[in-house]
């Protein structure tokens, strides 16, 4: 278990280049299984989850070549399907959430896809019904070994058949999986209540550049005309909007002046506006974001009728649930009070106990809602020893530690490494005092 030691209370300064988006990369890397031709992908983040998925592709027989920092070629012309039934796969496949998206492309191209119960953050129930109901609608037979928690789908001899489906929920990885299955199905598939995050838009654009025929990209109604085969392509992963949001929060809470370069502003949705609700100055400079040092703090805005500010998540284009933990920690030093409402996941707010230990004023109303009464920097958080429960709580605790007086220790930093590339190196370059102890 790795550990960070952080001496807090220092303002940072400088420029940050955001990494490629974790959740897009996980989709895109799975999509390389849809063609026997070479696929080139740029801006792949060097993070634990993505590296684990690339390893799984290697075990499946995909030829992988690293051609530069963040750039890879993949060729899936000789796939070893026996690996899917091996113990090695049962172990490797359960190591991350993104592995679930191997199933759609394998089912589409090879007629069968298997997956052990995927890992990822323990942030509440994470059902897979949307994925498998979609595959079943396309004609696949579903098998589930409850004892081994091993899922499988097999296509009929005649192949998958396009159809109309209304998803029960706009699942991000579920939509990606069904889209990847449908692009090679016979006939037309219509997916209503599809997720439409930039991750999905990027996946659909990539698939179209491989010869797929997907209409409605960016909306919640996707129409997919199946094609016989797909060809190779070159794709570039967008900057990681969750990482960008993390840097905004970090800058505000540590009163640092930071420029975040080339953020792809048009893909950030409500992220800048939502930070502004906490009174944080998010300035657009071309395609960069400039966060000035908040020397006089930041003040929570109120609604038009004067009622207390509420920040909650919703499926895209609503505010992403992955930034709520960061909003919460930043609110602990705001001027004013705010209600943070995590609607999607039921176990994502429990980390507030650590912040309360550090002196933050938070009432956890129930597992989904926390009221934060900001200190307005009149009292700083106290350094402490803590453990990172999940990726976004982890980065939030790191932000808290950087703003606290004294030296904090964060254990289980693998959770942070899952999604943040060289976080200590990049923080040090901004002047942070952080050491990776083990
Ligand atoms: C690898 C990856 O891409 N992970 C992301 C993906 O996970 P993932 O694709 O696993 O998440 P889903 O979109 O399936 O659902 C997330 C949770 O929200 C609930 N839900 C979802 C849609 C909806 O309309 N109503 C609703 O309540 C689901 O029941 C579930 O508990 O999307 C999540 C939601 O943005 C993000 O937190 C994860 O970072
Ligand atoms: C919840 C997240 O990741 P995963 O779905 O991979 O667990 C996240 O990125 O915040």
Image: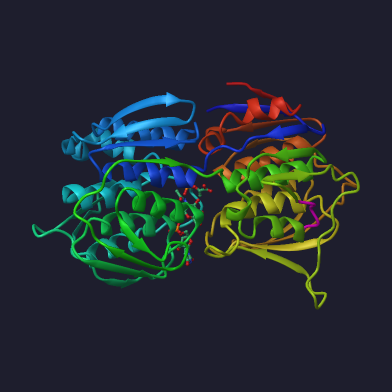
Number of marks in the image? 0
> Is residue 350 left or right of 402 when viewed as pictured?
left
Q: Nearer the viewer, residue 50 or 188?
A: 188
Indicate the quadrant where residue 429 lies.
top right
> Is residue 328 left or right of 233 when viewed as pictured?
right
| Residue at 19% over, 36% down | 79
Most common SS among magenta residues: loop
Q: Percent x, y for residue 437? A: 62, 21
| Residue at 73% over, 35% down | 384
| Residue at 42% over, 70% down | 193
Vertical position of residue 227 compared to residue 64: above or below: below
Q: Percent x, y for residue 225? A: 27, 64
Q: Percent x, y for residue 100? A: 34, 48
Q: Which residues are magenta?
A: 278-282
Q: Nearer the viewer, residue 6 or 49?
A: 49
Vertical position of residue 372 compared to residue 121: above or below: below
Q: Percent x, y for residue 13? A: 79, 32
């Amino acid at each position: 278990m790795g550990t960070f030691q952080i001496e807090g209370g220092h303002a940072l300064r400088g420029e940050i280049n955001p990494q490629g988006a974790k959740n897009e990369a996980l989709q895109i890397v799975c999509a390389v299984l849809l063609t026997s031709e070479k696929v080139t992908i740029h801006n792949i983040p060097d993070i634990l989850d993505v590296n684990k998925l690339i390893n799984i592709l290697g075990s499946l027989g995909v030829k992988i070549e690293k051609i530069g920092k963040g750039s890879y070629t993949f060729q899936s012309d000789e796939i070893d399907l026996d690996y899917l039934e091996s113990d090695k796969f049962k172990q490797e496949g359960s190591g991350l959430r993104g592995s679930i998206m191997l199933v759609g492309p394998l089912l589409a191209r090879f007629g069968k896809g298997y997956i052990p119960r995927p890992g990822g953050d323990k942030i509440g129930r994470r059902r897979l019904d949307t994925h498998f109901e979609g595959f079943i609608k396309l004609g696949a037979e579903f098998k589930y070994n409850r004892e081994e928690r091993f899922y499988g789908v097999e296509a009929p001899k005649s192949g998958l058949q396009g159809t109309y489906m209304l998803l029960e929920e706009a699942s991000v990885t579920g939509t990606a999986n069904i889209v990847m299955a449908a692009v090679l199905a016979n006939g037309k598939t219509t997916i209503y209540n599809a997720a439409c995050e930039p991750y999905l838009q990027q996946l659909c654009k990539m698939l179209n550049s491989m010869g797929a025929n997907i209409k409605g990209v960016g909306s919640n109604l996707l129409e997919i005309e199946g094609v016989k085969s797909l060809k190779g392509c070159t794709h570039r992963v967008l900057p990681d909007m969750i990482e960008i949001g993390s840097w905004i929060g970090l800058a505000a809470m540590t009163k640092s002046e930071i420029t975040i370069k080339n953020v792809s502003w048009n893909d950030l949705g409500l992220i800048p506006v939502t930070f502004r609700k906490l009174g944080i100055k998010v300035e657009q400079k071309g395609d960069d974001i400039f966060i000035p040092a908040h020397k006089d703090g930041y003040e929570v805005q109120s609604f038009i009728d004067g009622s207390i500010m509420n920040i909650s998540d919703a499926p895209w284009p609503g505010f992403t649930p992955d930034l709520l933990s960061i909003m919460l920690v930043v609110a602990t030093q705001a001027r004013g009070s705010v209600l943070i409402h995590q609607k999607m996941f039921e176990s994502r707010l429990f980390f507030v106990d650590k912040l309360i230990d550090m002196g933050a004023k938070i009432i956890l109303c129930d597992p989904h809602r926390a009221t934060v009464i900001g200190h307005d920097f009149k009292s700083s958080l106290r350094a402490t020893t803590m453990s990172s429960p999940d990726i976004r709580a982890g980065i939030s605790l790191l932000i808290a530690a950087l703003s606290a007086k004294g030296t904090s220790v964060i254990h289980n930093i693998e959770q942070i490494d899952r999604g943040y590339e060289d976080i200590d190196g990049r923080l040090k370059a901004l002047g942070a005092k952080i050491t990776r102890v083990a």
